[in-house]
Image (cartoon, rainbow, N blue to C red):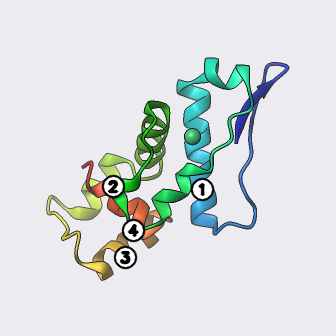
Amino acid sequence: MAYIKDGIGIIGVNALHHPNRQRFSAAHELAHHVLHDEDIRQAVHVDKGIRVLFRDDISALGTEPIEIEANAFASELLIPGDLLAAVLEGGGVDLEDEAAIEGLARRFRVSPAAMRFRLTRW
Ligand SMILES: [Zn+2]
């Protein structure tokens, strides 16, 4: 969740979630502060839908424009394009290659689903 109280930006993540998921959630909520501060000033913004990123169904990703933007922001923040390019050394990766995706995900401390999401927007 993200909100602004008395001018102070606040981000909350579920401490029971996997650390990689907490990192993505924090980055997603940071995106709301950076991109959607007018929205989160009006009411506490609670995200439940971003958990779809942690399933394998990439097509089920957020449908609201601000959620799509926040997921893209988080993805690019946690997996910067220049670092990803350096790791891939100008090559690509087969999205069906589970071991390769998991290896990249470990390097960037994201879930394999988050890595797959980033690679499809590469
Ligand atoms: Zn959100």
Q: Callout 1: few (<14), some (14-19), or many (20+) C-alpha neighbours within 10 Å?
A: some
Residue type (three-letter) at the residue carrying disc 1:
Arg
Which quadrant of the view contains residue 16? Answer: bottom right
Q: Nearer the viewer, mark 1 or mark 2?
A: 2
**Contact between labelled residues 1 and 4, with CB atoms less than 8 Å apart:** no
Q: Return the mark for residue 59.
A: 2
Which quadrant of the view contains residue 106? Answer: bottom left
Task: Residue under label 1, please give it.
Answer: 23
Query: Tag 4 or tag 3, which sits nearer the N-term?
Result: 4
Residue type (three-letter) at the residue carrying disc 2:
Ser
Residue type (three-letter) at the residue carrying disc 4:
Asp
CA–CA distance between discs 1 and 2?
A: 22 Å
* Image quarter in which the N terminus is found: top right
CA–CA distance between discs 4 and 1?
A: 18 Å
Q: Is residue 106 above or below residue 87?
A: below
Quick one: 1 or 73, which is closer to the camera? 1
Q: Nearer the viewer, mark 2 or mark 3?
A: 2
Task: Residue under label 3, please give it.
Answer: 103
